[in-house]
């Protein structure tokens, strides 16, 4: 595994580049280009989907742009990991689904194709030490084989959450009629009052950790309901099932070549406007313009787009100081806790057992899995999410220990064949310098009602992007793209 | 007022120095001393009470020390503000009380005397547009004239919270038997279930904003109960009333010459070991030692003490990366929101009306006040806290607008004479670069049970101090001193 990680570090874009053909991005070229410092219309901080999309639109409008990226790769929370067998899989953002129009349009424009997430056969429920296969349609994306009272209770809870989500103005959840009531309690408090049948509470808990990589106790009810509300577009209000489902849901499709192919190809269109390995340390106003200082380079610009997660935006030194509301907001939007573990096998052997590779479990370090095999099934890949409390418990564990714990779960779910993968790749977002958690910032009670408007409100010539700022598909690749498009419009209107 | 602020900026230690006689601290001397870089046993980040106390103990043990302070003054959240009439008052930490043994011992050792907070005469309750004076002993530090049902309910709630606090091990609240139950709900949720009489809820709400400068919705019940538990010492368990009361409580005494006299005199004993105006940007391990880089200076040390609030500690770049648990903790301990407004009058005129200057109010931007006049009452000073939602609403208001709003409240509480102070001083902690809120970090549900141990656990040679890390009087000057003493012991044992 040590070797696999080394590989992964050396050629992070290896898989993507191989598939894309033309895409090569190295720090060397960018470093040279940056040495002299730059003077541009707009500096963009962060080369994730948000920053890259903003840069694309600004360049298209004839503006000069410099994109400063802390990592030696683009994509932010979207990364391809080489599997050691020539294949590649997603270490971060992976799936797209219906109403995620903007990431789809972007991928289309870059010639990145999609294919359906493997979803043929039955799901597995592992609960109370018992394994049950079940069909994949109905409530919460499927009808898990729990007691009827639990199913009925879960259905009512789901309907309630969807009803509440309909009452949320997605561009300002803090103005909802019941915002104060929903923002003074945790999702856990609300679930305990509403998901009163234990099996219903179990299903909702699993939905919560799967969606947020956070425990219900960490989340404001208003934030949960708002997140559901954003899981749609202007003509299709968000629903809980669109978040949880595979078919017809947010896990419906994957990208051929891996999701990082999208930001990689997008970055290629920007040429040397992009500077890698340039973590931004300060943004200072100077003579009506801004000086953006990164390790090894400095950019002077009329406007700045900050397209990094809020807790990382907080770590940049701003001069003059940001307004208190903006600063305190960024003190209160921590990253959730997530990792992904992908085990590779010669074949997707579970398919022969009539299983789709998707598990819901009440135990183990991995309580939800997907079949991450490539479209041609030339090998098998099981991907498991390690989430919230389970991820935190393993933050400091050795990779060997995590591997052992994950494979133990995979054996429990899929049998002894799962014990011996040909390779194993682990992505721990909590341990990444330029994310420190994932997949998305979460909000505890009080945060949205107290600070919500500061999410997107520009500060002088500084504008905010990133999936957390999106009014649709916040927390997803689609939200990142939307935020980039929005911030570009905002900047162009102001320039 | 503009003039007053200018004064305040130019001679932040003016008042303290005048009283102290010997204390003079300027950036110039420190700047010169630092120019060459330093090599020491221990680098201390932050010259608040915690960092200075740690430095004192390390120096006393024969160690070489360098203290790097971001501001051009010492004291952190403890600052004296000149009043424009030759007097001085506290813009931050001000009061001490019983069981706060360590700040008292420190002040004694530096020859800083205490005097009783003015507490003669009646309190005022302003509620539902009605003003009522009441005696200052009994429940919650006094028996506010609300309905009997409300008083009875409040007494039961107070007893419950004190009982719960007794179940908290102060060095590890997350191990309390009911930690999980208390950490999955907001204090607001618990209050709504327990403070069912409206006037009782009002009293507890005021207690909450007064203690935490945060709304009950922002706080984990476990955090609230833990905070109460720490309001004592090893022989006197913490109680809610010790937090809220003046006599026999945390507001009992003040320092002659203003509280900043304590850190100022402590700093004077450190000589040129202290470097002001040196915000630390990075802490990097190098050859088994640490390189601490601040604006304008670099210190090399065997060990590092970081004695700044958690959300500011998060803004330092660490190499190697901090463990995920420590990083995510600092993403989840935001500063509360607080300001202090002090109006100065020729005399403390309210005393003649039989009032002690202490108000509890259900309205206004200032809902709790104190008589901040000097011990000889040579002039009058009314100090008002602006807290939580009220402070946030005024973060971006002009100082003139805040002054007008505060004086309107003071007139409501104390009559027309309050309308025309001879001077007015405002300290808005949310707008301070090197605090960005106050008085203390707060914890939402989940934070303590998920991340508590990371509060004090050293990371390699990096040790953590600051009032947030104290097992007694967390959030107070006493906690800061205790944390400095503890971290010095920790470092000395490790060196």
Image (cartoon, coloured by chain):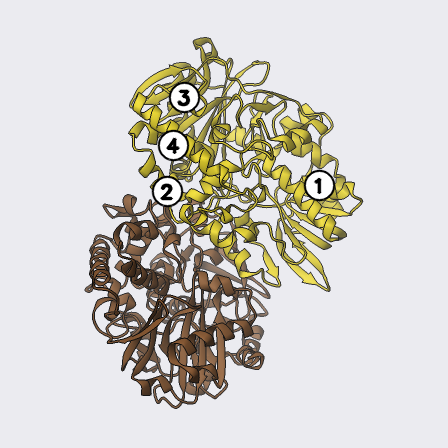
Chain colours: A yellow, B brown
Kindly identify which residue carries mark 2. A217
Kindly identify which residue carries mark 1. A28
Foreground of the two, A434 or B237: B237
Give the distance between the C-alpha atoms of the residues marked 3 and 4, in whole angstroms: 30 Å
Earlier sequence position, callout 3 versus callout 1: 1
- What's the chain of the residue with tag 2? A
Pair 3/1: label in front = 3
- Picture quadrant where residue B494 is located: bottom left
Q: Is residue B225 visible?
A: yes
Residue B260: percent from left, percent from top: 42, 76
Q: Is residue B42 visible?
A: no
Per the image, label 1 sits on a secondary structure element best described as helix
The answer to whether marks 2 and 3 mark residues whose Cβ atoms lie closer than 8 Å is no
- The N terminus of chain B sits in image quarter: bottom right
**Mark 4 and mark 2 on one chain:** yes
Residue A337: percent from left, percent from top: 45, 39
Residue B348 in the image: above or below residue A455:
below
Left or right of B139, for residue A47: right
Per the image, label 3 sits on a secondary structure element best described as helix
Kindly identify which residue carries mark 4. A157
Kindly identify which residue carries mark 3. A410
Give the distance between the C-alpha atoms of the residues marked 2 and 3, in whole angstroms: 28 Å
Earlier sequence position, callout 1 versus callout 2: 1
Residue B260 in the image: above or below residue A346:
below
Pair 1/2: label in front = 2
Earlier sequence position, callout 3 versus callout 4: 4
**Mark 3 and mark 4 on one chain:** yes
């Amino acid at each position: 595994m040590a070797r696999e990680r080394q590989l992964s570090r050396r050629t992070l874009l290896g898989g993507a580049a191989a598939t894309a053909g033309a895409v090569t991005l190295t720090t060397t070229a960018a470093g040279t280009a940056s040495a002299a410092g730059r003077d541009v219309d707009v500096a963009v901080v962060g080369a994730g989907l948000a920053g890259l999309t903003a840069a694309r639109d600004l360049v298209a409008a004839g503006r000069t742009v410099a994109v400063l990226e802390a990592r030696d790769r683009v994509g932010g929370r979207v990364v391809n990991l080489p599997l050691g067998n020539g294949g590649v899989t997603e270490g971060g953002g992976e799936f797209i689904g219906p109403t995620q129009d903007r990431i789809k349009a972007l991928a289309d424009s870059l010639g990145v194709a999609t294919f359906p997430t493997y979803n043929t056969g039955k799901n597995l429920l592992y609960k109370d030490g018992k394994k049950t296969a079940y069909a994949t349609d109905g409530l919460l994306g499927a009808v898990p084989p729990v007691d009827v009272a639990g199913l009925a209770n879960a259905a009512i809870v789901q309907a309630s959450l969807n009803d509440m989500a309909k009452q949320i103005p997605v561009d300002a959840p803090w103005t909802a009629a019941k915002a104060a009531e929903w923002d003074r309690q945790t999702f856990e408090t609300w679930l305990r009052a509403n998901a009163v049948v234990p099996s219903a509470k179990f299903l909702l808990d699993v939905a919560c950790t799967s969606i947020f990589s956070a425990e219900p106790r960490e989340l404001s009810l208003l934030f949960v309901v708002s997140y559901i509300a954003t899981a749609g577009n202007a003509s299709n209000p968000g629903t809980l099932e669109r978040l949880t489902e595979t078919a017809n849901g947010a896990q419906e499709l994957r990208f051929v070549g891996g999701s990082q192919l999208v930001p990689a190809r997008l970055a290629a269109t920007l040429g040397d406007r992009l500077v890698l390995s340039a973590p931004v340390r300060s943004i200072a106003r100077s003579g009506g313009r801004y000086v953006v200082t990164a390790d090894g380079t400095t950019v002077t610009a009329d406007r700045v787009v900050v397209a990094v997660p809020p807790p990382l935006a907080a770590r940049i030194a701003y001069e003059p100081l940001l307004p208190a509301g903006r600063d305190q907001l960024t003190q209160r939007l921590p990253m959730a806790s997530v990792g992904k573990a992908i085990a590779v096998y010669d074949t997707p052997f579970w398919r022969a057992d009539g299983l789709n590779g998707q598990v819901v479990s009440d135990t183990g370090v991995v309580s939800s899995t997907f079949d991450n095999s490539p479209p041609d099934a030339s090998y098998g890949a099981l991907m498991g999410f390690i989430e919230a409390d389970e991820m935190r418990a393993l933050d400091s564990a050795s990779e060997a220990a995590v591997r052992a714990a994950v494979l133990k779960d995979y054996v429990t779910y899929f049998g002894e064949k799962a014990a011996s993968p040909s390779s194993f790749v682990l992505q721990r977002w909590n341990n990444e310098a330029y994310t420190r958690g994932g997949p998305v910032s979460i909000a505890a009670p009080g945060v949205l009602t107290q600070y919500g408007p500061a999410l997107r409100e520009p500060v002088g010539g500084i504008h905010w992007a990133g999936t957390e700022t999106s009014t649709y598909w916040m927390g997803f690749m689609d939200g990142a793209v939307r935020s980039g498009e929005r911030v570009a419009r905002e900047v162009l209107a102001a320039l």
